Amino acid sequence: MSAGHTAVTTTPRPVVWCEDGVDCGIRDLLDRLGDKWSVLTVVELAQGVRRFRELQRALPGISQRMLTLTVRRLERDGLVSRTVHPTVPPQVEYELTPLGHSLTHLVRAMVDWSYDHHDAIVDSRRAWDAANPGSEIR
């Protein structure tokens, strides 16, 4: 894109409003991917099939209850499939569905962006905190 080129070259998609006046397109996605555990779970499952304990070990800090809720929500949204193998004890595996895999390039872009810009954000926060002493924004 040239410096003088400022026109939009694609037609933006219209916002689709639900009956209650809420944007049910992007807000549904943000509801799911707005929490760190869903994004980190998708990132981990993009590597392949994982058992529950493998997921839990790969996500330091997540509790068993939070991981259970996270994979259930992702399964409900059609992003993750759950397979129970009839063993004793039952072995449960999770993997991304085709819909979940279609999301991974967006999540990967967020991960790459955060990696590329982490230092700049840390520097900006330090500068802001120094300029605004006593502010407790965290």
Image: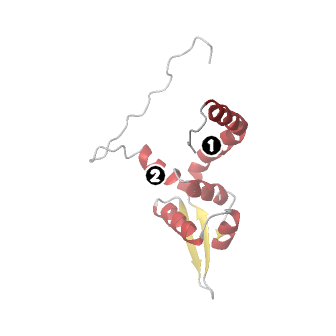
Q: Quadrant of the N terminus?
A: top right
Q: Amino acid at mark 1?
A: Met
Disc assigned to residue 31: 2
Instruction: Tell me if 72 is positioned left or right of 118 in this view.
Output: left
Q: Quadrant of the C terminus?
A: top right
Colouring rule applied to residues? secondary structure
For the residues bearing labels 2 and 1, Cβ distance under 8 angstroms: no
View extreme (left): residue: 19
For label 1, the SS is helix
Packing grade of label 1 (10 A; few <14, some 14-19, many >=20) is few
The mark that comes first in sequence, 2 or 1, is 2
- Say above or below: 51 vs 104: below
- Which percent across, then down, holds residue 6? 53, 16
- Please identify the quarter of the rendering in which residue 14 is found: top left
- Say above or below: 14 vs 100: above
For the point 70% across and 34% down, the residue is 123
Q: Amino acid at mark 2?
A: Asp
Q: CA distance from mark 2 to mark 1?
A: 16 Å
Instruction: Tell me if 6 is positioned left or right of 114 in this view.
Output: left
For the point 46% across and 52% down, the residue is 31
Q: Nearer the viewer, residue 74 or 86?
A: 74
Disc assigned to residue 110: 1
- Which percent across, then down, holds residue 15? 37, 37
- Which percent across, then down, holds residue 125? 65, 36
For label 2, the SS is helix
